[in-house]
Image (tube, rainbow, N blue to C red):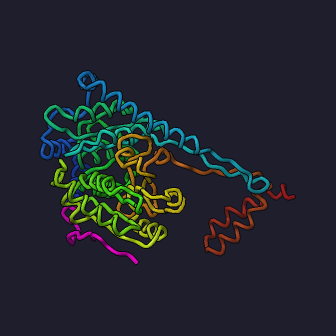
Amino acid sequence: MRTYVKKAMPAVAALNVQVEETVRGMLAEIRENGDDAVRKFAFDLDNWGRDFRVSEDEVRAVTARLPETFKEDYETCKRNVQDFARRQLDSMANLECEIAPGIILGHKHIPLKNVGCYIPGGKYPLVSATIMSIGTARVAGVSHIIGCAPPRDADGIYGPTLYGLHAAGADEIYCLGGVQAMASMSYGRVGMAAVDMITGPGNSYVAEAKRQLFGTVGIDLMAGPTEICIIADETADATLIATDLLGQAEHGPDSPAWLVTTSQPLGEAVLVEVERQLANLPTRDIAAVSWRDFGEIVVVADDDAAIAASDEYAPEHLEIMTARDDYYLENLKNYGSLFVGEETTVAYGDKGVGTNHTLPTGTAARYTGGLWVGKFIKTVTYQRMTPEASYRFAPVASRQCETEHLLAHKITADVRRARFAGGES
């Protein structure tokens, strides 16, 4: 039984056919008309008519202007994320085993060759995204990394973002945004070599471009509006919960913020506290709309019911503030990243405590995790057999092929049975 202290009331949204059709047209034009189309879109959409490739001199000039405190903080975050990525990489062992006499199977982990990483600008320039994508790809062993970010003004890329693109390890940096950036990296335009995978968040047009480009290239995730869910009981602090809910609601007017609680009084207190904090929140114009339309507070009977409710949300970010945090850690199944205890918060993960902030949204956490070092690595298999093993397995494969009516397949097994008959044991 669930009781809603507040229920989300989003407006019914029709399928945005306009975005889909606009992106399809842009991709087709860039595919067919190449650099000229990219330049046209860059000028029309971002008022950018200068060179796209950022020079080393530009990087040095920006680096010299930035505060040392920012650079030190950036390095701390990069070190955390890359150290965790290295430890994840260390857990990914190559494998070779003999599953039966003479049958040797294995897998190898091979880094991707070329990756394109998009860093969004817009209202909130996500500098930390340079670490999450480029920095992690560097640890994975990707051979060549292209970084793209849109111009913020007449000077080009936002200074801290440009610094981050370079410091995280991009081999090439381009001042290019939106659909035209994704298409250029995928098709190989304006001096880029075509990449094998594109990564990065962005607006609805960028997200749609990634969807349509998937197959031509790989993608990290389909990223929708950011989400937060908090599970809390009577021991939690309503003020802190409200702060964290609004911390994510400021992202955009369609960013869900959910509270699942076993305490009706806590749920009611959080509702009051959110409204109190909204009155003075610097980004209240955005956060208030998000909370009004997508905010939700649900009261459940017990811890297991809270787990069930949270797993249905399958949130991008999930915070736990309870007296039984370890129980939740052990039993929760669907989330992008988990923040255990009131000492942690989504902002820590977003900015560089060590885990990756590129995470599944829209219930995709039911079937996938977020971006990590393994996303930049292919796991490929191989097999080897002795003549004796080939002779023994051939009739099994032959009969299976015949069952499936794949007679040419069957012959490939039969000829090996005959070829290695001398190895019969």
Q: State which region is magenta.
A: 1-21
76 w.r.t. 301: above or below: above
Report the number of discs.
0
Q: Position of residue 104 (x, y in %)?
A: 72, 51
Task: Pinpoint residue 194: horizontal percent, then vertical percent.
Answer: 35, 42
Residue 61 placement: quadrant: top left
Q: Quadrant of residue 121?
A: top left
Question: What residue is shown at x 40% (from left), y 72% (from top)?
Answer: 300
Q: Is residue 139 above or below residue 413?
A: above
Q: Nearer the viewer, residue 150 or 13?
A: 13
Q: Quadrant of the C terminus?
A: bottom right
Toward the right, the furthest residue is 425
Q: Nearer the viewer, residue 127 or 379?
A: 127
Q: Is residue 101 left or right of residue 186?
A: right
Q: Is residue 212 visible?
A: no
Front in this rendered view, residue 120 or 320: 320
Nearer-the-camera pick, 206 or 245: 245
The image quadrant of residue 124 is: top left
x%, y% of residue 127? Answer: 30, 39
Q: Is residue 337 left or right of residue 183?
A: right
**Which residue is painted at 29% across and 71% down in the image?**
5
Q: Position of residue 55 (x, y in %)?
A: 26, 26
Does residue 175 show up?
yes
| Magenta-span inclusion, residue 11 | yes
Residue at x 50% of width, y 47% of height: 374
- Is 393 displayed left or right of 4 in the figure? right
Image height check: is 82 above or below 9? above
> Going 21% across and 64% down the picture, which residue do you hit?
292
